[in-house]
Image (spheres, coloured by chain):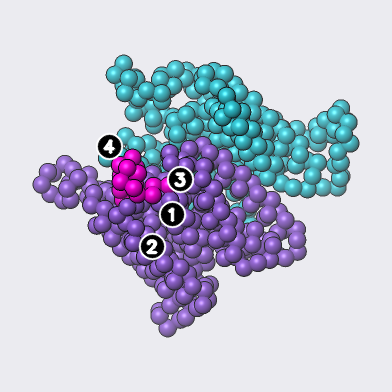
Chain colours: A cyan, B purple
Amino acid sequence: MSVNPSLKFDLIADLRELFAFPFMVHALEAGTIVAVFAAAVGWYMVLRRQSFAGHTLSLMAFPGATGAALIGLPVSLGYYLACGAAAIAMGQTTRTSTRGFGSETAVIGAVQTVGLAAGYLFLSLNSAILSGTETLLFGTFLGVTEGQVVTLMVIAVVALALLAAGARPLLFSTVDRELARASGIPVAVLDVLFLLLLALAVAATSQITGVLLVFAVLVAPPAAAQQLTSRPLAGLLLGILFALLVVWLGLAAAYFSPWPVGFYTTTFAFAVYVIARLIGSRR
Amino acid sequence: MFAHAFVRNAYLAGTFIALASGCVGWFVVARAQLFAGDALSHVAFVGAIGAAVVGVDERVGLFALTLAVAAGLGALGGRGRLDDAAIGTVFAWILGIGVLLIALLATSGLGGAGVTTANALFGSIYSLSTGASWLVAAIALGVTIAVTAVTRPLLLTTIDAEQAAARGVPVRLLGLGILLALAVVTAEGTQAVGALLILGLLSAPAGAAHRLTANPYAGVAISSLIAVAATWGGLALSYAISSLPPSSAIIGLAASAFAIAALIARVSARRPGWGPPS
């Protein structure tokens, strides 16, 4: 970067500088969409105690990207295919595993490592993109194009509309599974559909934030919100608010300092969670 | 194949890491704490990078950070079940620190940031020295023996924590103990199959064992056996096919064992009187 941005502690001037470059505007746009999208889906994920599945899905972007590069498909298509396949694999087993005794977590763990091992194999077969591994894992927030922002927007709007349409039955089946089943809600179908929605959120998000850091927006803001309120709508909105705060502050802090975005977003997310937990435990 | 020292070292370290992870993995899966293992494996990666930045031996960073986080998770969890959102938030933050450390490593002029990252993530079992592999084997054997020694009380706390506490079994201590054992296994495994893939050795053999038998002792034995067999087979395969990374081969075999076990369990559930009792 030829310019050297510096914080002047003048709010107007600093904000103007923040929006001076197109790449920064795109990053802020993408970050805003990601925050709303991921926090809304993440609120359900945290409530359903599916963080492990969510994390596994977020890692599936790695084999998706390396596999797509190997056979010459568009990388983002690889993200969606791999995440979708993993969601279906995990959804099948949640339905059939009646044995309990923790075998479900073993399935999630196995799906995760098989995906990663495959990704590593693809990477070693196609050594040309080895240099991109870190970008893949930790994101290219500052290299977002306008096309990516538009695609992200379309996917987020469609997915959030789906989530809104199924919000009530999904909440019902999450809170009381047996009662929901008894009153005729297709619980097993909702399980798979939710995993697919989560896969979509993760695949869209990880292209911006990187594979390993999706989790910061997906889990911490909703978890913090759930510490503060148990009312569904208030919790959802609070989670989205926290996620926006985390992403905006993270991007701004990274812009004015030499340290990476991922470090700032995860640190702010962690801080929000810790504060929410402290407040929540006091009440 | 065994004429090469690096192959012998890989087999020595790999065997005992597999033994320990198969054994510890069975309990971790039974206690539904695999997500903690997932978190610890990412922590191990950050530990390795951190050690490279500070300039100390990789193993110091690995063990220090994984053991510290395991103790922290144990303290957070207390007697109840660990909250998965708390685990997720903590390890997302630790990964964020990892990103910062990679950035520092890349600009520090120490060089090799990419290689350090790749090795920490995916392991480099063929580059272990003879001394290192003996040390790895000894520590892994120690963990296996320690876990085997407390199998009975550990089983009791896993199946019924209330009753175990009533009988005077130190439930909290054992819970912390299994997390610390998990931390050691992850730190060990990071050196061999890598931080991202050790979860496979913890989950797949144990998952297979849980599908095949409900008997805990047989389960631990089967789990360890599958892990060791997958490691041996994987190392041989990757030696024969040079473009196949050893970590991918090991995980592929372990996962195949899991898939076969799930199939057997499904068939035997349909045909009563055949296969293991469920």
With A249 as the anchor, is B78 left or right in this view?
left
In the image, what residue occupies the spot 16% across and 41% down?
B270
Tell whether position B199 is magenta: no
Type of amino acid at the residue the image marks with label 2? Ala
Of the residues under marks 3 and 2, which one precedes in the sequence?
A: 3
In the image, what residue occupies the spot 46% across and 45% down?
B35
Tell me how far mark 3 sits from mark 4, CA to CA: 20 Å
Tell me how far mark 1 sits from mark 4, CA to CA: 29 Å
Q: Which residue is tagged 1?
A: B177
Query: x and y percent of residue B61 in the render?
Result: 60, 61
Q: Which residue is tagged 2?
A: B146
Of the residues under marks 3 and 1, which one precedes in the sequence?
A: 3
Magenta stretch: give its range: B155-172
How many labels were placed on the picture?
Answer: 4
Residue contact at pointers 3 and 2, CB within 8 angstroms: no
Type of amino acid at the residue the image marks with label 4? Thr
Q: Which residue is tagged 3?
A: B35
Q: Which residue is tagged 4?
A: A98
User: Are tags 4 and 2 found on a single chain?
Assistant: no
Query: x and y percent of residue A18 in the render?
Result: 81, 34
Quick check: can you spot residue A218? Answer: no
What chain does mark 3 sit on? B
Tell me how far mark 4 sits from mark 2, CA to CA: 32 Å
